[in-house]
Amino acid sequence: MKESFVTTQGSQQTQQPQKHYGITSPISLAAPKEIDCVLTQKLIETLKPFGVFEEEEELQRRILILGKLNNLVKEWIREISELKNLPQSVIENVGGKIFTFGSYRLGVHTKGADIDALCVAPRHVDRSDFFTSFYEKLKLQEEVKDLRAVEEAFVPVIKLCFDGIEIDILFARLALQTIPEDLDLRDDSLLKNLDIRCIRSLNGCRVTDEILHLVPNIDNFRLTLRAIKLWAKRHNIYSNILGFLGGVSWAMLVARTCQLYPNAIASTLVHKFFLVFSKWEWPNPVLLKQPEECNLNLPVWDPRVNPSDRYHLMPIITPAYPQQNSTYNVSVSTRMVMVEEFKQGLAITDEILLSKAEWSKLFEAPNFFQKYKHYIVLLASAPTEKQRLEWVGLVESKIRILVGSLEKNEFITLAHVNPQSFPAPKENPEKEEFRTMWVIGLVFKKTENSENLSVDLTYDIQSFTDTVYRQAINSKMFEMDMKIAAMHVKRKQLHQLLPSHVLQKKKKVNNPYDLLSYWLQHSTEGVRLTTLNDNSLDLSMDSDNSTSVPSPTSAMKTTSSFLVKRSLCLIRLKFCNLPYLCHSCIVEGITSLRHGTFGGGQLTSLLPKENII
């Protein structure tokens, strides 16, 4: 995808009065310096291997698919108009249109991501038409696969795969006789006389369009948002349903940062993002614009009027009427986890701006399964794959209830749910069963007798499972053999339930001989070395997945002992005045070797060419 990533605003522009964005004055109008442009380019190069940029060919394919879908909508609406005996003059100009929203509309979708779309129809086309005749029309298209209608959802939707691209299509009927091509959905008057389902369906497009109109520079906003979304996903804090933030909430936080630093480019904006929100005084709301009253009597977020809104912990308010809090699922624990991540992000970006760290450090995935001593493992199982999908969807939507219940336990400080789910081992290998599990990390309050403390979580867990079963029965989803269970496990027991690759630890190497041996073995694999403390190094592979590295002992077997010893001696001669070879000299020696600055060809002359980076 071709974008003008490093977008600056010249001095001539900054000297003129700037358009004011947001509800407060900007914090800084400073223009980017040359180092900011260099750091932004480095950020782009770091993001590329993670697949956050789509190739131009794939983008054009999406545009072509949306064009086909748009033509289908127009054709279908003309057919409906003829069936309902509208005048020919109206039929010829009746229109109809597909709008997009979400990450695709914002311009930050990743490779293979789905598309959120909205079908807008004139007043004589009913929702029932959308779920019958349009559904049947889609069924006849050879490019359409996995077609399914979810008519009873909170926001009704048709889901499909069109020529390999997943698309969710919502429906909205406007009180207009025809749908013009240049229709602007931000116009509040369009909401008059609409039913609540149409208003909900329109909300995604209206919010997305408002965000794009409320940022000073769209290209800088997009690159910053790509970086923040990747960081949030890598750090397991990207999930609206589980009480973290979803895509639109992250977009609004980035948009607010852009408003506060209107001339900054992405490298600066990422740092300022962490600076602003690590110090934000929650529950003060994040607003992109002053809320407007449209006199349509729709419910809006307003803690002065609605007592329940006063209990929202991390309000981020959508900019389109009717204004809503996009983060009502956030709990005490999830906010605590996110604020801590903001602080760590600030510390890392401080280092990056001082050239003490690379951008890759920001996107390193922490090991959730080493973070806590105690966990709750939640298991959901069903007899068929189709039932499992429905059952898992319901259970996942209720996990925040369990987290809320655990938070109220007097002995629990934190309940941190990992947004990733995992396939669970079968209870009975001979029985057809599909199982999914989630893991919740627990922090218990420290008490005088904490070693002998016994905490009974039976009530919390039973209350949660009862709620899930009751909802499944009431919605007529429940089938025999749909099960849910929860168990408390300690960290050392996780290996019995989770796949081994999930639990792998990063190896630490203390011995200088082992350290250099390991580096020589893996120098062509892009090994990243990060000093942890005076006595150890963290050696981790530069890859999307958290992968443990082979043990240094195995590396030693395949590396010449003589080569390693000679290398250590030369590093000592070059860097170390001590009677022994200290850890820091090993690091300095390897760094010099990696960058070709050892001098005199002493060490590099010993190494085969394939071991030189």
Image: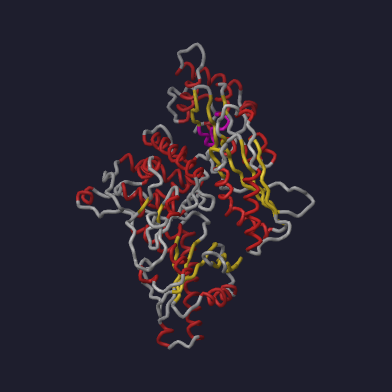
Residue 601 belongs to magenta span: no
- Horizontal side of 7 relative to 109 (left or right) equals left
- In the rendered image, residue 426, in percent from the top left (x then y), is placed at 73, 48
Q: Nearer the viewer, residue 329 or 155?
A: 329
Q: Main secondary structure of the magenta part?
A: helix
Query: What's the colour scheme?
Result: secondary structure
Quadrant for the N terminus in the image: bottom left
In-front residue for pair 497/77:
497
* Image location (x, y in percent) of residue 438: 62, 47
Image quadrant in which you'd find residue 187: bottom left
Q: Position of residue 560 (x, y in %)?
A: 61, 24
Q: Is residue 128 above or below residue 247?
A: below
Image height check: is 473 above or below 137? Answer: above
Residue 358 shows in this picture: yes
The number of numbered discs placed on residues in the rendered structure image is 0
- Measured as percent of width and height from the top left, residue 24 is found at 29, 50
Camera-nearest residue between 281 and 493? 281
Furthest residue in direction right, as rendered? 430
- Residue at 23% across / 51% down in the picture? 13
Q: Which span of residues is magenta-colored?
A: 519-528
Question: At x 67% / y 38%, what residue is drawn?
Answer: 495
> Which residue shows up at 66% across the image and 46% down it?
486
In the rendered image, the residue lying farthest to the top is 579
Residue 40 visible: no
